[in-house]
Image (cartoon, helix red, strand yellow):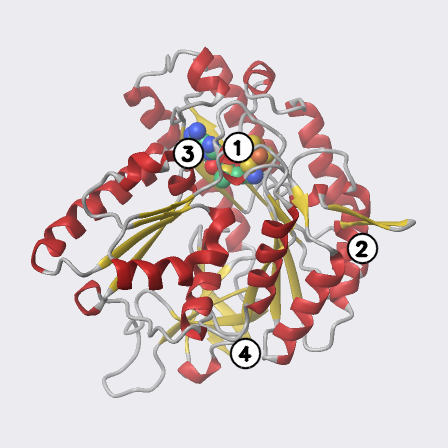
Amino acid sequence: MNKLDTALVSSALKDAGFNLTESVKEADVVLINTCSVRQHAEERVLSHLGHLKHIKESRPDMVVAVIGCMAQRLGDKLLEHEAVNIVCGPVQLPQITELLTKALQQKKKELAVTQKIRRKTPRQQDQALEQFESAYGIGDRRIPGQAFVRAMRGCNKFCTYCVVPYVRGPELSRPPRAIIEQIKKLADQGVKQVTLLGQTVNSYKYKSGQRSYCLADLLDMAGNIEGIEWLKFVTNYPAEEFFDEILHVIADSPKVCPYLHIPAQSGSDKILHAMNRRYTAQWYLSLLDKARDIIPGIAIAGDFIVGFPGETDEDFEATVDLVKKARYRNCFIFKYSPRPGTKAETRLQDTVPAEVKQRRNIELLAVQEKISGKLSAEFLGKEVKILVEGLSKKPHLNAAEGDDNPQLLGRTATDYIVVFNGQQSLAGQFAKVKIIKTSPLTLFGQLT
Ligand code: SAM
Ligand code: SF4
């Protein structure tokens, strides 16, 4: 979601005549797009701001804007920071160029956030967001051939640990026509893979006259767009809502990738209840069974929080048990971080000591690593189709001096990461690669 917002802002700024630079030294304007999901993410922003404050001592004209969730959460408190000129929440992003231009000319501090974030967004603001969203495509796109497209904004689930409903506002599904038009435009510009985004993307629903649209309808319509080869969607909430329809569209459409990111968060029913996740571990596992029955080769990924208030060793063992049974391709594991204003933070004590959270995190990662290792090993000797993203993190690995075949990175339809040596011009293209070595999170291949 934040990558998309960054791309939208970059695109808008480029259109307004700004030039993008990665170097703070060169910049007249610095934008920090922020996340409030865990305290650590916010601490990193504050540390960046400390650094920028130093730089501004010798360059007082530099304009610093903090955008996104932390801007919405902290509002004027953040504006008080010496380094900060602009605080702009997610709903106000369409105003960003105007705010920057004003700050550059008038040197005044500007606050643009929503006062009552849980209220329905006023029509005018909604239209501005739609316009901002659909203009995207012309500007900066970091991964060639790929684009994110928002299907929904906000969230209404109110998991007790989560800050998202308080910073992104109520759930709202974008009109299917706007989404499809946007995807067509992206396809015309050479985009081959689109990932539809929503905090609970499977609950996408939009009523237009007599007809109502769900995510499966969107995927189906997007699958008919010429030029679009792969469709992905994240993130799913484990609920019955439209689930069968989604599984069937994955099974029936060659363009919808057989990959499901569906966070469980815990394997203990007691903790799931305290988290306000509205399912049991058993029910969740039966959902995965159903997915595997309908789409045999499907890859499943999950998220977990360890050390939620009241999580005992027994609760944690239930999570380990669920991870073993779920056979995820990979898992994102987080240590519980109390977020101000959430129910878990206001009503529950953060009882699990930091070292226990750390130990459980490491243990769960190790359990998952074994499973990922086994699943990856099944690819040995096989040929896979990947969409090439660009240079890997170690582009010079296995590349001879002066060789124009650096190490590249791509992903399969099931989201496996594949590295191989090849020409950089392959970025944004599909390629076939034979897997010659595997590790839990990476497949190593050779172009065929
Ligand atoms: N909407 C998605 C869902 O329902 O699973 C995920 C949204 S959240 C931005 C991404 C992940 O961050 C969650 O799946 C959860 O595991 C983790 N997370 C959210 N709040 C957290 C907290 N307070 N402490 C630790 N991890 C948290
Ligand atoms: Fe947060 Fe829960 Fe909404 Fe996901 S579903 S964004 S975890 S409140």
Residue highlighted by disc 3: 334
Q: Measure how far apart labels 1 and 3 are at the Cα level.
A: 29 Å
State the image coordinates of residue 291 (x, y, percent, origin top left). Answer: 73, 43
Within 10 angstroms of label 4, few (less than 14), some, or many (20 or more) residues? Answer: some
Q: Toward which corner of the image does residue 268 lie, by quadrant? A: top right
Counting residues from the start of the chain, the first of labels 4 and 2 encountered is 2
Ligand 1 within 8 angstroms of badge 3 C-beta:
yes
Q: How many marks?
A: 4
The image shows residue 156, relative to residue 62, as above or below, that is above
Q: Residues within 10 Å of mark 2 (few under 14, many from 20)?
A: some
- First in sequence: mark 4 vs mark 1: 1
Type of amino acid under label 2: Asp
Kindly report which numbered mark, 3 or 2, lies closer to the viewer in this rendering: 2
| Structural distance between the alpha carbons of marks 4 and 2 | 27 Å
Give SS at disc 3: strand
Q: Quadrant of residue 106?
A: bottom left
Q: Is label 2 in a helix, a strand or a loop?
A: helix
Amino acid type at mark 1:
Lys
| Residue topped by disc 4 | 429
Instruction: Tell me the CA gap for discs 3 and 2.
Output: 33 Å
Q: Quadrant of residue 185?
A: bottom right
Q: Earlier in the sequence, mark 3 or mark 4?
A: 3
